[in-house]
Image (cartoon, rainbow, N blue to C red):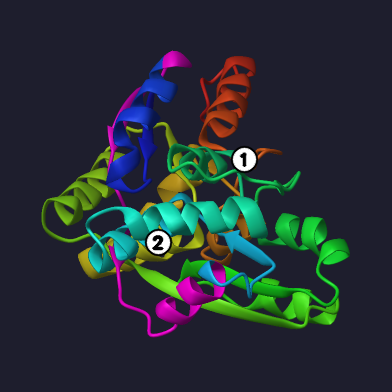
């Protein structure tokens, strides 16, 4: 059975290995790209950490970690600034990560994570952090596209202040990645893909935008009513449902492996191998 996977390109090797381990063939088509951007608040964020002004730093994704350290390297290729930054995080500040992949990425740079939510999402982070933030100074490191729900909830919970460093942006696929996205859509229409997975609302938005540009959106939606559709998180599910697509699998844990595990269970129990 072939599954369409739409995660960013940097996750391809890991994603294919996981899907293969659960018995799936994979067509990989990244529907979002991550581009690091210069955010004027980054220097303020950096100094806030180095001087111990911040009490809590929240990393919203693996990309947020990677982009922070890339910015730091640009400022000081010797590595001394990065070393000071890691020391400050570990000695003076509570560090929160949205999920285990983000925590592992922090650990790869030498940073310890103290807060990991039960639900790997903004909502889960809010629930984990709200009891901890009264009177605290908080930085959230995220993409430009992230909404301000977490910020608002932490402010409501009594944080002294909450600031955001939006240091990367999520863009539609370009070049070869765009061609792969178009091929994914064509394979879906041809019946060559029996399961499609989405890991973010932006993946969904770009998917249907490309389909619309190709003039096949309605046909694609009709086809998706006859295959299994999986989504990570309620916002992603709601984006799909807004386009008239029913979602079959939303894993309890917000990880790609948990999604593939639940998809495998679903198609194994179905006499039609995942087709509705």
Residue 23 is inside the magenta segment: yes
Which residue is pictured at 49% across the width and 49% down the height? Answer: 199
Quick one: SS at disc 1? loop
Position of the C terminus by quadrant: top right
Residue 193 appears in the figure:
yes
Q: In the visual, does 97 lie left or right of 200?
A: right
> Which is more toward the observer, 69 or 263?
69
Count of marks, rendered view: 2
67 is higher (above) or lower (below) than 262: below
Question: Which quadrant of the structure image shows residue 13?
Answer: top left
Residue 25 horizontal/vertical position (percent):
33, 21
Quick one: SS at disc 2? helix
Which residue is pictured at 57% across the width and 56% down the height? Answer: 89
Question: Which quadrant of the structure image shows residue 49?
Answer: bottom right
Residue 34 appears in the figure:
no
User: Could you classify mark 2 by the number of other residues whose Cα lies within 10 Å: few (under 14), some (14-19), or many (20 or more)?
Assistant: many
Q: Name the residue under label 2.
A: 68
Q: Name the residue under label 1.
A: 248
Per the rendered image, the range of residues in magenta is: 21-49
Q: Which of marks 2 and 1 is nearer the N terminus?
A: 2
Which residue is pictured at 66% across the width and 61% down the height? Answer: 122
């Amino acid at each position: 059975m072939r599954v369409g996977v739409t995660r960013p390109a940097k996750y391809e090797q890991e994603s294919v290995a996981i899907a293969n381990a659960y018995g799936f063939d994979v067509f990989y088509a990244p529907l979002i790209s991550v581009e690091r951007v210069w955010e004027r608040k980054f220097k303020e964020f950096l100094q806030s950490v180095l001087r111990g002004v911040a009490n809590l730093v929240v990393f919203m994704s693996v990309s947020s970690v990677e982009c922070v350290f890339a910015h730091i390297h640009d400022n000081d290729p010797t590595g001394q600034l990065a070393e000071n930054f890691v020391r400050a995080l570990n000695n003076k500040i509570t560090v929160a990560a949205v999920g285990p992949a983000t925590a592992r990425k922090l650990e790869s740079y030498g940073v310890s994570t103290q807060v990991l939510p039960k639900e790997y999402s903004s909502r889960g982070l809010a629930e984990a952090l709200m009891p901890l933030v009264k009177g605290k100074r908080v930085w959230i490191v995220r993409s430009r596209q992230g909404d301000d729900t977490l910020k608002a909830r932490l402010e409501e919970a009594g944080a002294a202040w909450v600031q955001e460093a939006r240091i990367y942006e999520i863009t539609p696929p370009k070049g070869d990645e765009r061609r792969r996205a178009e091929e994914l859509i064509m394979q879906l229409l041809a019946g060559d893909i029996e399961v499609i997975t989405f890991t973010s609302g932006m993946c969904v938005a770009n998917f249907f935008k490309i389909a619309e540009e190709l003039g096949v959106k309605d046909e694609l939606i009709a086809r998706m009513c006859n295959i299994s559709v999986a989504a990570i998180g309620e916002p992603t599910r709601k984006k799909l449902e807004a386009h008239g697509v029913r979602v079959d699998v939303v894993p309890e844990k917000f990880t790609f492996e948990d999604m593939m595990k639940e998809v495998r269970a679903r198609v194994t129990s179905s006499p039609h191998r995942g087709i509705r």
